[in-house]
């Protein structure tokens, strides 16, 4: 069996407080930077931890909506959204640079991430907001999404992202968190899910179909209650399949 090295990322800095346990188990992290959660203090604490555990750091901007944790689409003008996204990323950069840490990537959060999968005008607005970073920063985006296709056409460096702890619809959108089967919480089920993503480049959707998908990075949500249990299990089991979480 060929030896593989993969990237597992987590959304962090969202008020859970499990980062000291989480970061040793992953290879990149997406740090909330003020839109849905987070501030300079929390960013600083996590960047320091990330340096300690050799974890790549990225900005995790969202709709500016702390009340709904960035998980609802809000009515905001294009210019207002661009200003907010840039403000969030520059807040992250200010702290990262003070800690001599490099921004590896940008990953949008929550409702913004989901809308960017299918909404071309929104994707164009978002890419315009972050175009100043496209030459030296990766963009984490879903495979076969509108934002991925547009980012590639504009010369962005992208990494396709798949979710270890979320179920998929047939169109490769994520099952809504409003549904009971949105999350995959069993560590063994998560392992089977990620092995299929890695080895078969496919995902089993909630209808039982198998759909082709590409993934360069794999996300376990840091606010999933079973996140530590899942990541500990993956850290123990993936090496048995000749798969290493890269640092």
Image (cartoon, grey):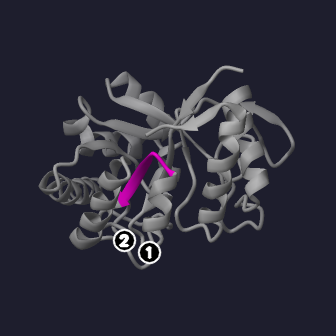
- Residue name at image x 59 percent, y 64 percent: 228
Inter-mark Cα distance, 1 to 2? 12 Å
Residue 23: name its quadrant. Answer: bottom left
Tell me: 244 left or right of 105: right
Name the outermost residue toward the bottom: 67
Rendered position, 94 above or below 1: below
Tell me: 116 left or right of 166: left
Residue 15: percent from left, percent from top: 42, 75
- Residue name at image x 64 percent, y 46 percent: 173
Residue 185: name its quadrant. Answer: bottom right
Q: Which residue is mark 2?
A: 37
Tell me: 70 left or right of 144: left
Q: Locate the N terminus by quadrant.
A: top right
Q: Secondary structure at mark 2?
A: loop
Tell me: 244 left or right of 156: right
For mark 1, does the 10 Å Cα neighbourhood hold few (<14), some (14 to 19), or many (20 or more) residues? some
Name the outermost residue toward the right: 208
Name the outermost residue toward the top: 2
Residue 138: percent from left, percent from top: 35, 35
Q: Is the magenta region chiefly helix, strand or loop?
A: strand
- Name the foreground residue: 239 vs 93: 239
- Residue name at image x 33 percent, y 49 percent: 57
- What mark, if any, has residue 17 been given in the picture? 1
N-term mark: 1 or 2: 1
Asked if residue 187 is among those painted magenta in the image, a careful observer would answer no
Q: Secondary structure at mark 1?
A: loop
Residue 234: percent from left, percent from top: 66, 49
Residue 247 visible (yes or no): yes
Residue 4: percent from left, percent from top: 59, 27
**Numbered range of the magenta stretch:** 26-31
């Amino acid at each position: 069996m060929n030896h593989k090295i993969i990237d597992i990322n987590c959304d962090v800095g969202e008020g859970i407080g499990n980062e000291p346990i989480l970061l040793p188990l992953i290879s990149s992290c997406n740090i909330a930077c003020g839109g849905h959660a987070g501030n300079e203090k929390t960013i600083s604490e996590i960047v320091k931890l990330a340096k300690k555990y050799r974890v790549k750091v990225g900005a995790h901007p969202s709709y500016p909506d702390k009340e709904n944790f960035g998980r609802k689409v809000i009515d905001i003008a294009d210019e207002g959204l661009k200003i907010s996204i840039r403000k969030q990323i520059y807040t992250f950069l200010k702290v990262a640079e003070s800690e001599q840490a490099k921004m590896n990537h940008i990953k949008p959060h929550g409702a913004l991430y989901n809308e960017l999968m299918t909404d071309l005008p929104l994707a164009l607005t978002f890419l315009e907001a972050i175009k100043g970073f496209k030459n030296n920063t990766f963009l984490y985006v879903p495979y076969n999404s509108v934002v991925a296709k547009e980012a590639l056409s504009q010369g962005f460096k992208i990494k396709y992202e798949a979710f270890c702890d979320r179920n998929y619809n047939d169109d490769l959108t994520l099952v809504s968190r409003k549904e009971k089967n949105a999350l995959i919480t069993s560590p063994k089920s998560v392992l089977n899910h990620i092995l299929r993503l890695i080895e078969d480049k496919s995902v089993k959707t909630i209808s039982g179909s198998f759909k082709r998908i590409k993934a360069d990075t794999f996300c376990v949500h840091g606010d999933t209650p079973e996140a530590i249990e899942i990541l500990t299990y993956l850290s123990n089991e993936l090496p048995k399949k000749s798969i290493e979480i890269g640092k």
